[in-house]
Amino acid sequence: MTASFAPSSWPALAPAVRGAAVASVRAVPLAGMPAAWQWVLRPNCSISPHQLLSVYLSLCIVSLAIAGVCFWLGATYVLGFTGLELLMVGLALVVFARHACDGDTLTLMGASLLVEQRRGARTLRTDFMADWLRVEPAAGQGSLIEISGQGRSVRVGRHLRREHRAEFARQLRAALRRLPPVSEPASAATPAPHRP
């Protein structure tokens, strides 16, 4: 996991969870907006889609070359089995690539927490008022983290190791407690009494 922090008016959060499958935990300053915290929870990917395609194509070339030699020497069935094998490996890599970008992104900006959950081609977005949120384990110690409020709930932390989910929940609660107070609109403020 990596952690990088940009200048912010908020106090620093607790230290980042070491060894978790978190791509990044960073503070995001936005021009003209209050400071925002963003947590990106994704599995660590050790190979890019371009590299994966290169490896698969090189596997195809080597396997088909060996199968071609076997076919030329009279073992005709080897070519068919090689084609079946490469098809199955290709399908497995497509399934892997489809879910390589899965993850949860939590963005706390002002008094709003936006939770984006990506699963394959679908992205589910849930917006919460951060003042009224509960952050708890969904079923017990080490389970997914349930964020609930305003009659809605989502579970995050699928890509965090079980032993690091509690620390992430503490970081999220600490950030929610440090929300700047919501100021009243100027028209709703009551004037101070006039003293003679």
Image (spheres, rainbow, N blue to C red):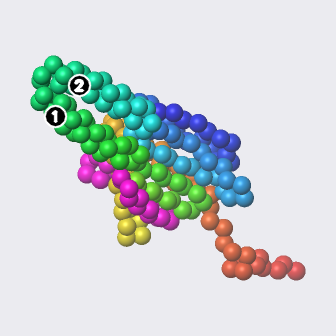
Q: Residue at x 76, y 79 (%)?
A: 191
Tell me the residue that label 1 is attached to.
80
Disc ID at residue 68: 2
Outermost residue on the right side: it is 196
* One can see residue 157 in this view: no
Using the image as rendered, state which of residue 158 and residue 73 is in the foreground.
Answer: 73
Residue 66 point in image, percent of width and height: 24, 22
Q: From this view, report whether residue 183 is shown above or below residue 55.
A: below
Residue 3 point in image, percent of width and height: 54, 35
Using the image as rendered, state which of residue 79 and residue 44 is in the foreground.
Answer: 79
Give yes or no for contact between labels 2 and 1 (Cβ–Cβ under 8 Å): no
Q: Helix, strand, or loop for circle 1?
A: helix
Amino acid at pointer 1: Gly
Q: Which residues are magenta?
A: 119-144
Left or right: 191 with respect to 43?
right
Q: Residue at x 15, y 19 (%)?
A: 73
